Amino acid sequence: MTADRNPPFRLLVVDDEPIVGKRLQQVFSKMGLEVEVFTSAMPALTAMAERPFDVVVTDLKMEGMDGMEVLARVKRSNPETRVIIITGYAEQETAKAAFNQGVFDFIAKPFRLDDLKRVIERALSAESADEQGRPD
Amino acid sequence: MTLLAKIRNLWAGRGFREEGAPVCHPIKLVFERFRRVLHFNNQALEIIADMGEMLGGAFIFDHQSILGLADRLAATVRSSIDALNELDENRHQDLYPVYDRLTTQLRDIMTGGEERQGPPLLPLSAIQPRHWGLVGGKFAHLAEICHDEQIRIPEGFVITSRTYHDLIDENGLRETLSSFEELMARPDTEETELEECRGRLEEAVKKANPPSGFREVLAGKLAQMRENTGGPLFLAIRSSAAEEDMELSFAGLFRSVLNVPAETDAIFRAYREVVASLFGPQPVQYRRQLTPGEGPMAIAVGCQRLVDAEVSGVAYSLDPLAPASPAMIITAAWGQGEVVVEGAIPTDSFRLEKSPPFRLLASQAADKKTGRYPAPDGGLEERSIPAAAQQDLCLTPVQLAEIAARVVHLENLAKRPVDVEWAIDGRGELYIIQARPLVIREQEVGTRALPAVLDAYEQLVSGQGKIAQQGIGAGPVFIVSSQEDLQHFPEGAVLVSRRDSSSFLRVMHRAAAILTEIGTPVSHMATLCREMRVPCLVDVPGILNKVHSGMEVTVDAEDRRIYKGRIPELAAYQAASLDLATSKEFRLLRRIIRTVSRLQLLDPLLQEFTPEACQTYHDILRYTHEIAVVKLVDVGRDERCLLRDHLVRRMELPIPAGILVIDIDGGLAPDAPPDQVEFKDVASVPFRAILEGMLYPDVWHRATMPVGFKDLVSSMLNAPPDAVAGQYSGHNIAVVSRDYVNLCFRFGYHFNIIDAHCHDVARDNHIYFRFLGGATDLTKRSRRAKLIALILEAFDFNVRTKGDLVIARAGNMVRSEMERTLDILGRLVGFTRQLDVRLDSDRSVEHYAEAFLLGNYDVISKEGGGAL
């Protein structure tokens, strides 16, 4: 989907359980994305401040700063970055709040890799459309 | 029963009950309760299947998700037991203690408690998958391969992590250990504080006393080993920490003590040394840097006979410096191999082709002045190498080829590149000392450039098929169309077949990948692929038309692509990628799946079928399902129950099958007549399919069967018990709903049950077929059983026979496949009716099986006899 883009799309993953980042890194690097992985929110935000990402995938419940806070900060600093929240605790209320704050999608763990691939593909094609000055 | 008692029963909602007769609830209520059992069973099996798919790599999940699923599974199994008790008047209370026991076991695994339970010491050959949590990473790898006939491993045993925990507890070190683990877990820990705590533990373990009873166990084991050896015996004592050689190698960080005399005190001292190295400065730093937040780590210790090596070394199944080339690397030195892994002395190096005859591409002889050898009283000593051998290559071409073949075999077993330590003793025997996944750094592979590189290769399949097990495998295609083909399956080939089959298990250790044209990721074969880690795509449309035998292909069961030829870049990518199977989460999931999903309780007729015999949740589910089906069949069989509800309708068919239908939920059309129904009134999907088969032209033969006097006597003696009881003799009963049928047939003294569930979710679908008896003597009846089994096997049923009993199962099929299979069963029922009479020889079994499989159903009518 994105292999031929130059420069490559950039994906950031933040999840306090390392296995999630490790696997997403493997899968999306193979697809040609540039992937950076973090296990806590602060260093992830520092990386984002240095160079923005096209898509951010963040866990919801994390020690220190949680996924909702990550979403809020990303939306303030880089409104065009798509944020996808992944969580083991899929509560209606939280999902609703996240959508109000502009989350691109909300996925419950465990999820099929194909499902996340589709969401990310959608996020990136929405972005390409933006770049070309077309509406979403 | 008094009138008063009857009224009481009625109030209690139990219905009327005659002495000796079953309780007669309205069958609709019984069926609703039956459905509840099925509902929870399906839900639980779905969770188990999801876990299986997670193991196959299709899901992203974390530790929390595993625990969440396991909790849900426990609750659902419990609900299934509750529902069965509701269905069958609380007769199955004895399932609860079994459930409790299994649930405790599951919780132990979830909390990591199982590394504390089990034997203090385990012989290598006795290590089962359930022990993997006890024997540490390195020896779990070795135990996995030690039964392979091509692999020779020095005999020995593992002192398990349970002994480690006993050692900690009984020497009063638990509190110190907890503080240590706490310090390890905190990112802001002061180095000095950690260093002090670590040092204290290391020293204390070096001086620790053996846990109570351990000396005796160890002494017994050593005496046994000495006896088997018959001469002086020296052991190699090596670490096997929980995470060692898994996702991370911990290479060379823990201590090994080599050439220790096989005496209790000496071995225990060496054991303590190795355990203490868990708290050595280097491993502690390594854990802090590479596995932060991974939690406590226990250690097991392996004790094996030391191979008196003439030459030993290391082999990589892939060249780490040129991972995309089809070559492997072997390094070797005279004497013991630890000098090679330590990089302590110059070694000979060889580069070989990876496929037979393993042509030598390059070799380099080093100047090997010394080697390390076992000293007479223990430990190793350095010796000079005779001048003549110093410059010589220390492996002959024959030895190189032997090592190469073993390494390729180990790679096929592991389904990814491997790093192998080997040794050859004075008699020329090749031993595998260690085998671990070979991990190379991503930079050397260039994953970033991979998409463009891959796009340049010809793709046979792109984005089609379903992933049963993720992974990458390459090799020549080998098409399997029959069981016999499996006998010729070559090492490292890609198995391609129309359907999936659990019989592929036989060759999975040798297969590079498996591709099937139809199938689902939740089949038994898929489960086996996950256990054996064979990359596998199922449901790949038209694959048999796209490949031919011998054609080289590369299967990427991650992106669902199949390439023509071998793609070295993908092999390299695989070596650099995370080996999912070794990650902590996958190991936990795998242990949970093994604990819950093995099915031991196979058949109610063939073995002890009791709650106590249930060893897994799956067994419990099998048990509740079977008992629920039996309950339903019982109700269906008791005409007194059925007739009172006025739900029985007679089927009018063009063949004299004499079937009574009981519709419990949408199995007949709403406007079907109340007393007599025809084929067109049947709405039940599985029942309709069976009837279609029975009505197929020529299937219902009308030839007269010449029953002899001997046959007649046999039939009277062998009639199933309920024929003697006389219930519904002459009736065949079908209990049906829209997607379910339970059909009890009796045609002339044989007894046949078909129980089938058929709807849109493949996973829920099953066919259970049971056939018993006949009118002839046991030899002929057994021949018919054999005939039925042959035919069912040809249609991929899982079949077991015993005498004249046939039990066959199929499941996990999509609806269309289910209907096709049930149609075949219908034909089989018609075709084999009374056929036992004609089975005079074993040859006749083949004759009729062949006729059936070729669709020559009229063979019987043609062969003789007038109308029935």
Image (cartoon, helix red, strand yellow):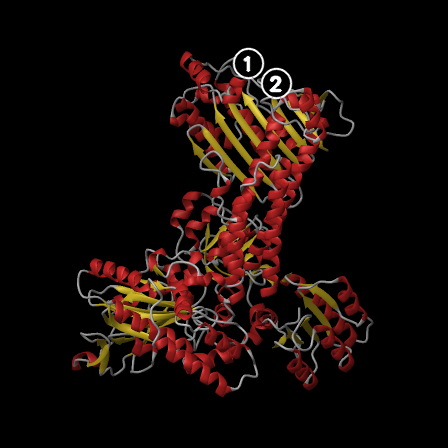
Task: Examine the rendered structure and indicate whether residue B104 appears above or below residue B738.
Answer: below
What is the three-letter code of the residue carrying label 1?
Leu
Is A77 on the left-hand or right-hand side of A28? right
Could you classify mark 1 by the number of other residues whose Cα lies within 10 Å: few (under 14), some (14-19), or many (20 or more)? Answer: few
Q: Residue at x 44, y 17 (%)?
A: B717
Cβ atoms under marks 2 and 1 closer than 8 Å: yes
Mark 1 belongs to chain? B
What is the three-letter code of the residue carrying label 2?
Pro
Q: In which quarter of the view is residue A107 placed?
A: bottom right
Quick one: SS at disc 1?
loop
Q: Which residue is mark 2?
A: B656
Q: In which quarter of the view is residue B283 placed?
A: bottom left
Instruction: Check the picture and name the quadrant holding the N terminus of chain B.
Output: top right
x and y, in percent, of residue B402 in the image: 29, 64
x and y, in percent, of residue B839 in the image: 42, 23
The answer to which of B336 and B203 lies nearer the viewer is B203
Q: Residue at x 70, y 31 (%)?
A: B13
Quick one: SS at disc 2?
loop
